[in-house]
Image: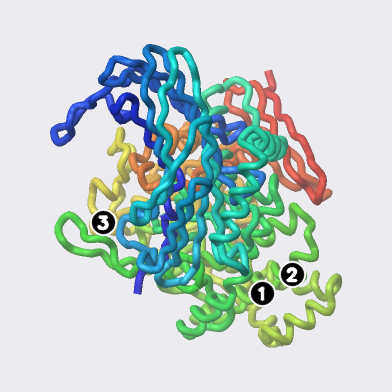
């Protein structure tokens, strides 16, 4: 049985070019085990246009013969039609009359790092002079994928098959100072997109797209990007670096988001790398989904429907663990079943570490309920709430009702992992216990709303989920008597009882570093210290703001400051999810210089590779966190007393203004915060 993971599709990109027999290679130097390049790469420029999603590369290359060419590549995956992928290559003879050969192919040999998910023996490969194609099915899930491509060329084309590699080829002499252009248009379908043959659908689409032509396809694609940026763009005046980084992170959230599919979500590393095998975590609901909720509600709806359609898996997990209701998996894929591995990869000392998150990181169910509620508040999509959202909130509340443990005169929750994953299997995480109270309160309000506004749905869910008066009274009791760890003397929320009895290590002692303190101290030492992996109590402050509360309801602002002063110096930011949450909270609390440092770090996690692991893929949660730090943190977007969205800006000193647009109940609202000077 293979661990479910995203399967790499056949590679649609390859275009190999030789000039007078010299292959174009993007290398200037050789390493020990490489042959010296036969040609010389004089120049190379690569530009990703964040506004249009078009990648351009340009090279100046001298072949061994001495002839020089400039080759310009353009490519995009259409935002207008997700099935269409476009490439254009333009070759210009700068010096001499080079003999050029172009091979454009599809490569079905692309494997994931650890497994080959394709049933190669049943693959179908097609090559005529007009089109090439490939079709194969995944081994475990049995999805079929079809990919077809066409090439337009001013010169005659032939085609051939090389195993799983169908290929076009064209050869010609390019006269001095003349240029030749080739367009390769590829289409892709899977059995999730069509009831018929995916390869047949891909062939039809490739034919139609080639008839439209690269320029028109590009025009439509750009028009779609314009629509997106019209709402999604955040403008920061006075900080070009953060402006660029913000557009970069916003771009990455969008290109990973499911625009056409209600059965997929955004993996922790988007679609850009093999990290975490393409699994879906809380990263989606609390980090990447909020920007979608406020700027692209249709996409946010798709993301929430992904969870709705996986309620059977969540119910199965709850029942298998002896609980009621729905308990979402910590790592989710297609099936909705728990897919967190139980053991780590082999460590340098040969051992493996037990991974407990799939067993005990249970706050994911509440994070999903939080996202549903936030979506509803911002969009006012009552139909969604009545048909789908309420069921998620109520069935996960039912899980917590059965999970809370009566102990003496209070309820406790043992064996948890909060956001700070360094401290495993702890009892009474303040994050978990307080969020469970929020969850049960929200579930009761949701049911009341349903009864008043959608009585048929209220009756349907009351019967289906067995929401008896006794069960609802039990929820009220848990809300009243849940243990919320709090130190009355220090006036702080306690991350979990026993936390302050462990060794204190100020994290600044280990600066500068790009790795985590955990990587320096080792797993077993770190878990016995007060080093925190990522925003935990601080995350609670981000989600609940002042409603985090205190035992007697007083002194909340001072307690929040005390919480910050206590937990910030202990935080490792060993997770990329952490800095943006700290930026958000620090900005809200008026600590704009600290907020800016955290924001700057978060915004550049991928652009500057400042966690040292961008090779595993883009950090989706950090990207979504950057948006939230700007909008909710520096912009202070909140609902005012009348329930309307309003700003309470706290800008860094050198920013002149911050502007953004959000959708509120179907209306676009533009906000600008200017620095008070
Ligand atoms: O979900 C996160 C978690 O909070 C920290 N470790 C990485 C996971 C995936 O990004």
Depth check: give the residue in front, 565 or 332.
332
- The residue positioned 81% from the left and 49% from the top of the image is 666
Residue 476 at least partly seen: yes
Residue 485 location (% of width, % of height): 49, 63
Ligand 1 located in image quadrant: bottom left
Q: CA distance from mark 3 to mark 1?
A: 37 Å
Depth check: give the residue in front, 190 or 500.
190
Q: Which quadrant, please, contains the N terminus?
A: bottom left
- The residue positioned 75% from the left and 47% from the top of the image is 639
Circle 3 is placed at which residue position?
Answer: 523
Identify the image quadrant of residue 529. bottom left
- The residue positioned 39% from the left and 54% from the top of the image is 108
Mark 1 residue crowding within 10 angstroms, few (<14) / some (14–19) / many (20+)? many
Residue 394 badge: 1
Residue 637 location (% of width, % of height): 70, 41
Q: CA distance from mark 2 to mark 3?
A: 42 Å
Asked whether, in this view, residue 215 is left or right of residue 604, the answer is right
Residue 446 badge: 2
> Contact (CB < 8 A) between labels 2 and 3?
no
Residue 310 location (% of width, % of height): 57, 72
Identify the image quadrant of residue 357. bottom left
Depth check: give the residue in front, 523 or 197.
197
> Which of the marked residues, 2 or 3, is nearer the chain's N terminus?
2
Asked whether, in this view, residue 571 is left or right of residue 257, the answer is left
- The residue positioned 62% from the left and 65% from the top of the image is 194
- Classify 68 as above or below 377: above
């Amino acid at each position: 049985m293979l661990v479910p993971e995203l399967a790499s599709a056949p590679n649609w990109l390859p275009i190999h070019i030789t000039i007078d027999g010299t292959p174009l290679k993007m290398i200037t130097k050789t390493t020990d085990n490489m042959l010296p390049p036969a040609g010389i790469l004089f120049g190379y420029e690569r530009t990703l246009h964040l506004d249009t999603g078009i990648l351009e590369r340009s090279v100046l290359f001298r072949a061994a013969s001495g002839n020089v060419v400039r080759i310009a590549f353009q490519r995009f995956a259409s935002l207008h039609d997700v099935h269409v992928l476009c490439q254009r290559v333009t070759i210009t003879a700068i010096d001499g009359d080079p003999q050029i050969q172009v091979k454009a192919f599809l490569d079905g040999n692309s494997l994931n790092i650890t497994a080959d998910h394709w049933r190669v023996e049943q693959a179908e490969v097609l090559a005529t002079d007009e089109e090439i194609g490939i079709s194969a099915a995944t081994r475990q899930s049995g999805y079929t994928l079809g990919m077809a491509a066409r090439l337009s060329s001013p010169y005659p084309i032939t085609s051939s098959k090389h195993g799983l590699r169908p290929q076009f080829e064209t050869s010609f002499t390019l006269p001095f100072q003349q240029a030749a252009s080739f367009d390769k248009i590829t289409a892709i379908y899977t059995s999730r997109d069509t009831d018929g043959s995916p390869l047949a659908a891909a062939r039809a689409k490739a034919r139609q797209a080639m008839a439209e032509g690269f320029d028109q396809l590009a025009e439509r694609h750009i028009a779609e990007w314009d629509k997106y940026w019209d709402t999604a763009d955040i403008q920061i005046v006075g900080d070009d670096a953060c402006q660029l980084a913000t557009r970069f992170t916003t771009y990455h959230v969008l290109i990973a988001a499911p625009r056409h599919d209600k059965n997929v979500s955004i993996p922790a590393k988007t679609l850009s790398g093999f990290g975490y095998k393409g699994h879906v975590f809380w990263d989606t609901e609390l980090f990447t989904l909020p920007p979608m909720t406020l700027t692209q509600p249709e996409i946010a709806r798709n993301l929430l429907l992904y969870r709705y359609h996986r309620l059977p898996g969540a119910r199965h997990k709850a029942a298998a663990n002896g609980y009621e209701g729905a308990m979402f998996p910590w790592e989710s894929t297609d099936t909705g079943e728990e897919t967190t591995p139980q053991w780590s990869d082999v460590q340098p000392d040969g051992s493996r570490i037990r991974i407990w998150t799939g067993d005990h990181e249970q706050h994911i169910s509440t994070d999903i309920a939080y996202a549903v509620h936030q979506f509803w508040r911002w969009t006012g999509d009552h139909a969604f709430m009545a048909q789908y959202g309420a069921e998620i909130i109520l069935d996960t509340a039912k899980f917590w009702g059965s999970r809370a443990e009566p102990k003496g005169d209070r309820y406790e929750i043992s064996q948890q992992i909060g956001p700070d994953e360094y401290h495993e299997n702890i009892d009474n995480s303040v994050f978990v216990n307080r969020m469970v109270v929020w969850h049960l309160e929200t579930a009761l309000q949701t049911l009341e709303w349903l009864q008043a506004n959608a009585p048929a749905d209220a009756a349907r869910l009351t019967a289906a989920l067995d929401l008896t008066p006794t069960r609802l009274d039990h929820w009220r009791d848990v809300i009243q008597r849940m243990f919320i760890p709090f130190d009355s003397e220090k006036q702080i929320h306690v991350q979990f009882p026993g936390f302050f009895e462990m060794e204190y290590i100020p994290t600044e002692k280990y600066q500068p570093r790009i790795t985590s303190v955990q990587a320096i101290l080792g797993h077993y030492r770190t878990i016995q210290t007060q080093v925190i992996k990522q925003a935990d109590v601080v995350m609670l402050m981000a989600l609940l703001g002042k409603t985090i509360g205190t035992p007697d309801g007083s002194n909340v602002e001072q307690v929040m400051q005390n919480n910050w002063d206590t937990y910030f110096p202990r935080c490792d930011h060993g997770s990329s999810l952490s800095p943006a949450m700290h930026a958000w909270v620090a900005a809200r609390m008026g600590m704009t210089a600290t907020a800016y440092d955290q924001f700057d770090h978060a915004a550049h996690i991928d652009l500057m590779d400042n966690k040292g692991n961008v090779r595993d893929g883009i950090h989706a949660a950090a990207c979504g966190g950057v948006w939230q730090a700007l909008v909710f943190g520096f912009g202070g977007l909140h609902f005012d007393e009348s329930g309307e969205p309003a700003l309470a800006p706290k800008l860094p000193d050198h920013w002149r203004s911050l502007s953004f647009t959000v959708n509120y109940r179907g209306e676009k609202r533009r906000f600008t915060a200017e620095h008070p000077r």
